[in-house]
Amino acid sequence: MSQTATLLVIDDEPQIRKFLRISLASQGYKVLEAGTGTEGLSQAALNKPDLVVLDLGLPDIDGQEVLSQLREWSTVPVLVLSVRASEGEKVRALDAGANDYVTKPFGIQEFLARIRALLRQVPDAEQTESALVIGPLTVDLAYRRVLLDGMEVALTKKEYAVLAQLARHPGRVITQQQLLKEIWGPTHVEDTHYLRIVVGHLRQKLADDPAAPRFILTEAGVGYRLVAP
């Protein structure tokens, strides 16, 4: 990837953002900034940066949660930059999908080298779309919103989780066990009645007739799939 890459810096310290903006711009990168986790997720969805530099100590959402939400819909490389130096914190971030971890204070030359290394690993066309549109239905994974005919649909946490899981793999069957394990936890993989109830409520809210479904298809005895766009 060329050095015209766009980098998003999510950090609540203005002096750190200024230092990184000057350092990164001097290397030819375009730099976007966000001072909160919410703003950072919005910037990531709107501008699709090539790499995200993420601080963990943010004022509104913890950086670990920002990383978790980002990974629900994006494969963008994330370099965590944090004062949290414990091994446990690093392992947690890397397990949650961070690509690298640098502790503050840091040396700028090593930091730039790590940026270059991460950008080299990413194919230019690998960004994931943050919103899935199927006819009148929009599942916006970045903003956790579902629209039907332009109107927002109020879903429970479980209803949204099931729909989002299907939306990340449109056209592919997701087994009942996969959905139960991901959403209810590994001790509930046999509790298929939970899933049937939630899918039934989802279909009602999306005006999706089970006899002639527009969106959610049932693969009998196996699982569900969302119609591909």
Image: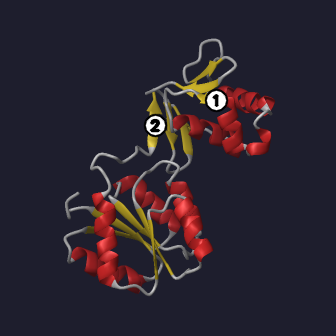
Q: How many marks?
A: 2
Q: Where does residue 218 sit, x and y in percent of width and height?
A: 63, 20
Q: Where does residue 165 sit, x and y in percent of width and height?
A: 58, 39
Crowd rating for badge 2 (residues with CA inside 10 Å; few <14, some 14–19, many 20+) = some
The structure's colour scheme is secondary structure
Q: Secondary structure at mark 1?
A: strand
On the rendered structure, is 168 left or right of 88? left
Q: Secondary structure at mark 2?
A: strand
Crowd rating for badge 1 (residues with CA inside 10 Å; few <14, some 14–19, many 20+) = some
| Residue beneath disc 2 | 132
Proximity of marks 1 and 2: CB atoms separated by less than 8 Å:
no
Residue sitting farthest toward the top? 211
Q: Where does residue 220 sit, x and y in percent of width and height?
A: 67, 17
On the rendered structure, is 29 left or right of 13? left
Q: Nearer the viewer, residue 131 or 149?
A: 131
| Image height of 168 relative to 98, above or below | above
Q: Nearer the viewer, residue 170 or 45?
A: 170
Question: Label 2 is placed on what type of residue?
Answer: Leu
Q: Residue at coordinates 51% horizontally, 58% vertically from top-left?
A: 97
Instruction: Give the quadrant of residue 25.
Output: bottom left
Camera-nearest label, 1 or 2: 1
Quarter of the image that includes the N terminus: bottom left
Question: Label 1 is placed on what type of residue?
Answer: Thr
* Residue 156 appears in the rendering: no
Instruction: Give the quadrant of residue 81.
Output: bottom left
